[in-house]
Amino acid sequence: MYNERVMKEFSNPQNVGELSDANGVGTVGNATCGDIMKIFMKIDENDVIQDVSFQTFGCAAAIATSSVATQMIKGKTIDEALKITNRQVVESLGGLPAQKLHCSVLAEEAIKAAVHDYLENYKKQKA
Amino acid sequence: MKRVYLDYSATTPLDERVFEAMKPYFTEKFGNANSLHCFGRDGANAVDSSRRRIAELLGVKPTEIYFTSGGTEGDNWALKGIASAYSHKGKRIIISSIEHAAMLGSAAQLEKQGFDVVYLPVNDKGMVLPEYLEKAITDDTILVSVMTANNEIGTLQPVKELCEIAHKHGAIFHTDAVQAMGSVPVKIRDWNVDLLTFSAHKFYGPKGIGVLYIKSGIKPDKFIAGGHQERSMRGGTTNVPFVVGMSEALRLALENLEENSLKIKKLRDYFVKSIEERVPYVVYNGDRKQRLPQNANFAFEFIEGESLLLRLDMAGIACSSGSACSSGSLDPSHVLLATGLPIEKAHGSIRFSFGKYTTKDDVDYVIEQVVNAVNDLRRLSPLFSEFKGEKKYV
């Protein structure tokens, strides 16, 4: 069902866990649908994502997309991160089965939600 | 890498003895069982004696045994064949809500044709209580169908009582015994069922062959129009080697049923006990006693079934989330939802099914791997860390 790249990412996911000093956290999905993705970001004063991690409840595709999405945005500015599309996430995994494409959408949304949390709840408070 | 097969409810390997019995019918005894010449007679004799042997093993008449391509065909034929043949008597058909996809799919087609299909609920153990049927049945109900044992959670159904209720109201009773045959005693005459489906590959026989038992006097419409095979009820050249294989597999399964089931049950019980001791936050789905000996089904909280399944696959372990026939679907098991299991727990459910070739070593290996995989995936799970944060445990 999944290609080797997806299985590799699933079996050895990167950036796993909670970031204790995160200043942007986004959670999307729900348990009823079978997917929850939570992304933690540590963003510096120049809006660069210094560190990122994730926790995901879901299938292999959800875990693999979370892992590559976090790798794609690490070291990027939040503007660059916001431009990441689900299509790019799928491409970097070499494709996903059709019924699993929604997982990549979830990754894109989780990035947006974490950046939004940073802008709305962290940066505004600081300003 | 070590490989352990714990998916015997999906299918079983062919028993070597069955394979040996089948072999001559692929090559030297290849005749069409319907041909009049000596080649054909080789085939016809094999089919006749297989049919007689199967009937004898089940305590029924050879003329009540109809060969099919397997469980799905048997279920389709029983449901659609009875519905169309008895539609003058009524439009109401009652099945359980935890039937196999073959039944549910057939029922959906009948609904489109104007039949009134009622789906019986189950209790939290996955059992259709007789009172549920009492409430739903009417005197114009033409057919009741409840599986002998559920394929996902292994719950054994009170088939005899359900059949009695159906008959009291003049309805025909069918049971899908695909998971039960060869695993627990299937008492066709004692239960007095009118139709019963089973499939050879669940008891170490070949895939693609099965039986629909149809009691004398019950007349479903024919399912596959064609030649005069199966008393003109099911056309198509008889698959002689598979029929021979099925009868040999059934003989082996029923002659050794008690011994094999006891051995399998012991391993299953050891597995269940170990998992419950070593993995916190698991739900053992199904009934602890009224259960197929080969079945164990767990909901592992905070994680999702497919990722656990694939983690175990990477460790060489074959098991299943729900049924093989429903994999590829993103929806959680209709069986678990029918038992009232919350949807997020249903997502994390895995079926382990044991067989006659399973060893204690296999089970010990699987226990270790399950413990590791569940721990790994829980470390990944936002639900688990939230839960830990709230409950402050460990």
Image: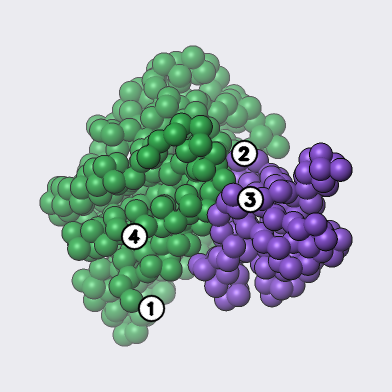
Chain colours: A purple, B green
Q: CA–CA distance between discs 1 and 3?
A: 77 Å
Q: Nearer the viewer, mark 2 or mark 4?
A: 4
Q: CA distance from mark 4 to mark 3?
A: 33 Å
Marks 1,3: beta carbons within 8 A: no
Outermost residue on the bottom side: it is B28
Disc 3: CA contacts within 10 A as few (<14), some (14-19) or many (>=20): few
Q: Give percent across and percent down for residue B34.
A: 42, 69
What is the distance, in whole Å, between disc 2 and disc 4 at their CAs? 27 Å
Q: Amino acid at mark 1?
A: Gly
* 4 vs 1, front mark: 4
Which amino acid is tagged 2? Thr
Q: Chain of mark 1?
A: B
Residue A32 in picture, x, y percent from top left: 62, 38
Q: Which chain letter matches label 2?
A: A
Q: For the point 81% across and 39% down, which residue is it?
A: A125
For image coordinates 20% across by 63% down, the residue present is: B361
Q: Is residue B26 left or right of residue B307?
A: left
Q: Establish if B82 lies above or below B206.
A: above
Determine the CA span between mark 1 and mark 2: 55 Å
Residue bearing the label numbered 4: B369
- For the residues beneath circles 2 and 3, the answer to whether they share a chain is yes
- From the image, tell me which residue sits under label 1: B31
The kind of secondary structure element at disc 4 is: helix
Q: Nearer the viewer, mark 2 or mark 3?
A: 3
Q: Secondary structure at mark 1?
A: loop
Compared to residue B371, the image places residue B389 above or below, namely above
Structural crowding at the residue carrying mark 2, measured as other residues with C-alpha within 10 Å and reported as few (<14), some (14–19) or many (≥20): some
Question: Answer yes or no: do the residues labelled 4 and 3 have beta carbons within 8 Å?
Answer: no
Which amino acid type corresponds to the residue marked 3 in the rendered image?
Answer: Asp
